[in-house]
């Protein structure tokens, strides 16, 4: 019963470094998404995917790349980390048969960029 | 105007009180509405979906007002364990869920 698994839980990067946040789900969900959560800003959608091979931008996509080569995995890549990307990142998935379904969230990744 | 707006609070209420939150949304075509609960430093978890006719789950009641474009959450007989941040979520088109900034609730003994 793993659900949505995110790794790592914590990460500290220096400005300009790159890294990939991993997200995997074992519920055969078609829809997967990445959000960032900052104090007072709520959850903001970065990128999402409605199925393998299909991705699209959310509200705050700049500085992030995604790919969806399998149904299970949806990694988020930071190409050149900036202090403004210090945040808590949540991956989420849902069944989504044609319309938004409740999201299942991972435990989050706390990222600090110095 | 933000797509989804909530009063961030904080709401401080005594144990046993009834408390209500509203969440307004701007996209009149929205079809799916949810309330999530988020504990400190944890991931959001689904509290309840919101149906057109309104729905109840124990002490929690959710309602949808399409004419005024808001959803509400009512908590009756509040418990200390209800202290959390409550997030509303509305579909913003193309299967995206847009979240409000959350309302922080503290139940005091």
Image (spheres, coloured by chain):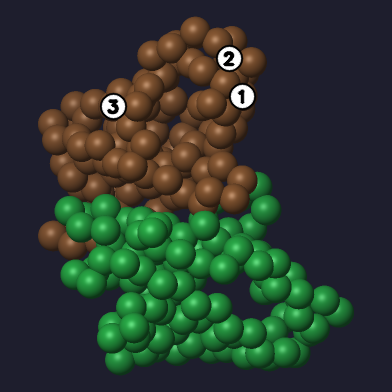
Is A96 drawn above or below residue A75 in the view shown?
below
| Residue A15: % across, % down | 55, 10
* Residue located beneath label 2 in the image: A13
- Contact between labelled residues 1 and 3, with CB atoms less than 8 Å apart: no
* Residue located beneath label 3 in the image: A66
**A49 left or right of A81 in image:** left
Q: Chain of mark 3?
A: A
SS for dot 3: strand
Residue visible at 80% across and 83% down in the picture: B14
| Residue A27: % across, % down | 30, 49
SS for dot 1: strand
> What colour denotes chain A?
brown
Closer to us: B53 or A24: B53
Q: Which mark is residue A112?
A: 1
| Residue B2: % across, % down | 40, 57
Q: Chain of mark 1?
A: A
Q: CA distance from mark 2 to mark 1?
A: 6 Å
Q: Which chain is green?
A: B
Mark 2: few, some, or many residues within 10 Å (few <14, many ≥20)? some
Is disc 3 in the same subunit as disc 2?
yes
Q: Quadrant of residue B92?
A: bottom left
Q: Which of the two discs, 2 and 1, labels the residue nearer the N terminus?
A: 2
**B107 left or right of A94 in image:** right
| Residue A69: % across, % down | 19, 27
**A46 left or right of B18 in image:** left
Closer to us: A23 or A111: A111
Mark 3: few, some, or many residues within 10 Å (few <14, many ≥20)? many
- Contact between labelled residues 1 and 2, with CB atoms less than 8 Å apart: yes
Is A82 drawn above or below residue B93 in the view shown?
above
Q: CA distance from mark 3 to mark 1?
A: 20 Å
Closer to us: B54 or B101: B101
């Amino acid at each position: 019963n793993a659900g949505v698994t995110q790794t790592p839980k914590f990460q500290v990067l220096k400005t300009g470094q790159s890294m990939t946040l991993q997200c995997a789900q074992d519920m055969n969900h078609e829809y997967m998404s990445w959000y960032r959560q900052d104090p007072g800003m709520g959850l903001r959608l970065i990128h999402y995917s409605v199925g393998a091979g299909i991705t699209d931008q959310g509200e705050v996509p700049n500085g992030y790349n995604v790919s969806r080569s399998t149904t299970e995995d949806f990694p988020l890549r930071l190409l050149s980390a900036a202090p403004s990307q210090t945040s808590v990142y949540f991956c989420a998935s849902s069944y989504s048969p044609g319309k938004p379904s409740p999201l299942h969230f991972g435990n989050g990744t706390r990222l600090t960029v110095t | 105007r933000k797509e989804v707006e909530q009063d961030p609070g904080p709401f401080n209420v005594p144990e046993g009180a009834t408390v209500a939150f509203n969440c307004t949304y701007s996209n009149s075509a929205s079809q799916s509405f949810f309330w999530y609960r988020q504990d400190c430093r944890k991931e959001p978890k689904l509290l309840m979906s919101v149906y057109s006719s309104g729905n109840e789950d124990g002490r929690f009641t959710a309602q949808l007002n399409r004419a005024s474009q808001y959803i509400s959450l009512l908590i009756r007989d509040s418990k200390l364990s209800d202290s959390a941040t409550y997030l509303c979520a509305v579909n913003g088109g193309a299967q995206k869920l847009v979240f409000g900034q959350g309302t922080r609730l503290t139940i005091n003994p």
